[in-house]
Image (cartoon, rainbow, N blue to C red):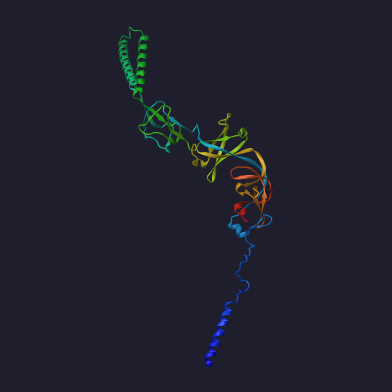
């Protein structure tokens, strides 16, 4: 019995000890607390400093592809962007139109298709003239009369030649002239009945447009083909300020990753729809990327210049006050925003007229990512 009471006492003590341990709070060691306190910030990462500048470590600069250029103040030509359109060179292309209404017939090489190369003077198609039944009957009757008159004239001429010794020479010559005239009239009328009009290429180049199908009936002056020399094109720009025409130093059309150089030809002296057309001659390898009728952007560089620092247009950013800024590298890992005033140069660069000085390292690539750091 004593041993039984002793066992009950030991069991009760163990149970009490377990309950006391279950209600005791547990604490983690130093540095292993998982409470609600915020995590410590990394002072070595990219961050916006209180003065508005940005701290950007070297590894982050390489990841963001941040590039800078040293600014140099200089006199730069102004750039103006104009809307333009590609046109054919009137001396290196042309239109093929029918002189009279009729039915189209294929040429020696068949009807040409768009993009086919042709030579100047090459026959592209034929037009069989169309005529009404009454008109055709009149032409046939006229042709018969002319042939009969020519036959009689030839017989009279033969008799006069047999009597050449007794007939004046002038009578024989007059009859010879009449026979020749009747022959030409017969040929003209006969050609009008059976002849066909040949449509020839006005210049060497390629077929830019074709509106021809075998057997098609066309009207007079209807456009059938258009021939363009792809190595000789014109660009017409539209200027709203007439002073631009007298201040053109150079121009180009941006295409893809390059540009097509333009040569100034001249400007019109009359407005068209309240704008002044300015003509340029296009040249260069980029002409293969242009097509007649294509709208393009024409960057005109003027003779008048502006003094400033040339920077890429992609370097311009906006600050919270909606002011134009550029980022300047002032230390190895520190960048500061500078409020600037700019003037356009061309489609890819601008001139900073205020806010920068010679020697400033301006961020030319990666400015967009740098501007987003908070």
Instruction: Please tell me in which quadrant of the rendered image residue 216 appears.
Output: top left
Horizontally, is 212 left or right of 1 in the view? left
Q: Name the spot of residue 248 as percent of width and height, x first.
A: 61, 36
What residue do we see at 56% from left, 38% from top?
83
User: In the rendered picture of this protein, how many numbered marks are placed on residues?
Assistant: 0
Q: Name the spot of residue 94 as percent of width and height, x first.
A: 46, 32
For the C terminus, give its image quadrant: bottom right
Instruction: Using the image as rendered, state which of residue 325 and residue 173 is in the foreground.
Output: 325
With respect to residue 181, does 208 lie above or below?
A: below
With respect to residue 312, does 13 lie above or below?
A: below
Q: Name the spot of residue 189 as percent of width and height, x first.
A: 35, 20
Horizontally, is 135 left or right of 38 in the view? left
With respect to residue 265, does 153 lie above or below?
A: above
Q: Residue furthest bottom?
A: 2
Instruction: Using the image as rendered, state which of residue 52 and residue 327 is in the foreground.
Output: 52
Q: Name the spot of residue 316 as percent of width and height, x first.
A: 62, 48
Horizontally, is 95 left or right of 26 in the view? left
What residue do we see at 55% from left, 85% from top?
12
Instruction: Using the image as rendered, state which of residue 180 and residue 62 is in the foreground.
Output: 62
């Amino acid at each position: 019995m004593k041993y039984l009471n002793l066992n009950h006492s030991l069991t009760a003590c163990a149970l009490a000890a377990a309950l006391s341990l279950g209600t005791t709070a547990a604490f983690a060691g130093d540095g292993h607390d998982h409470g609600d306190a915020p995590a410590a910030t990394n002072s070595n990462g990219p961050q916006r400093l209180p003065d508005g500048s940005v701290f950007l470590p070297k590894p982050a600069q390489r990841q963001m592809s941040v590039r800078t250029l040293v600014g140099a103040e200089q006199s730069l030509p102004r750039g103006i962007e104009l809307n333009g359109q590609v046109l054919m060179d009137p001396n290196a292309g042309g239109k093929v139109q029918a002189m009279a209404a009729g039915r189209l017939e294929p040429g020696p090489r068949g009807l040409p298709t768009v993009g086919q190369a042709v030579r100047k003077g090459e026959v592209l198609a034929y037009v069989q003239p169309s005529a009404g039944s009454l008109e055709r009957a009149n032409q046939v009757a006229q042709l018969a009369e002319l042939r009969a008159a020519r036959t009689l004239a030839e017989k009279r001429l033969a008799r006069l030649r047999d009597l050449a010794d007794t007939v004046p020479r002038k009578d024989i010559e007059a009859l010879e002239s009449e026979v020749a005239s009747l022959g030409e009239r017969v040929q003209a009328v006969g050609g009008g009945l059976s002849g066909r009009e040949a449509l020839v290429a006005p210049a060497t180049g390629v077929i830019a447009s074709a509106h021809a199908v075998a057997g098609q009936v066309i009207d007079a002056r209807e456009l059938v083909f258009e021939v363009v020399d792809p190595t000789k094109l014109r660009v017409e720009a539209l200027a709203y300020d007439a002073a631009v025409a007298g201040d053109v130093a150079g121009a180009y059309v941006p295409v893809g990753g390059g540009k097509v150089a333009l040569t100034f030809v001249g400007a019109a002296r009359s407005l068209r729809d309240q704008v002044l057309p300015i003509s340029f001659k296009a040249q260069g390898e980029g002409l293969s990327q242009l097509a007649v009728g294509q709208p393009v952007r024409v960057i005109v560089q003027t003779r008048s210049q502006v003094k400033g620092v040339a920077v890429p247009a992609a370097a311009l950013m906006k600050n919270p006050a909606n002011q134009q800024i550029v980022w300047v590298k002032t230390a190895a890992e520190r960048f500061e925003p500078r409020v600037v005033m700019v003037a356009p140069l061309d489609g890819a660069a601008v001139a900073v007229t205020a806010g920068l000085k010679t020697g400033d390292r301006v961020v030319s690539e990666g400015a967009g990512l740098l501007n987003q750091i908070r």
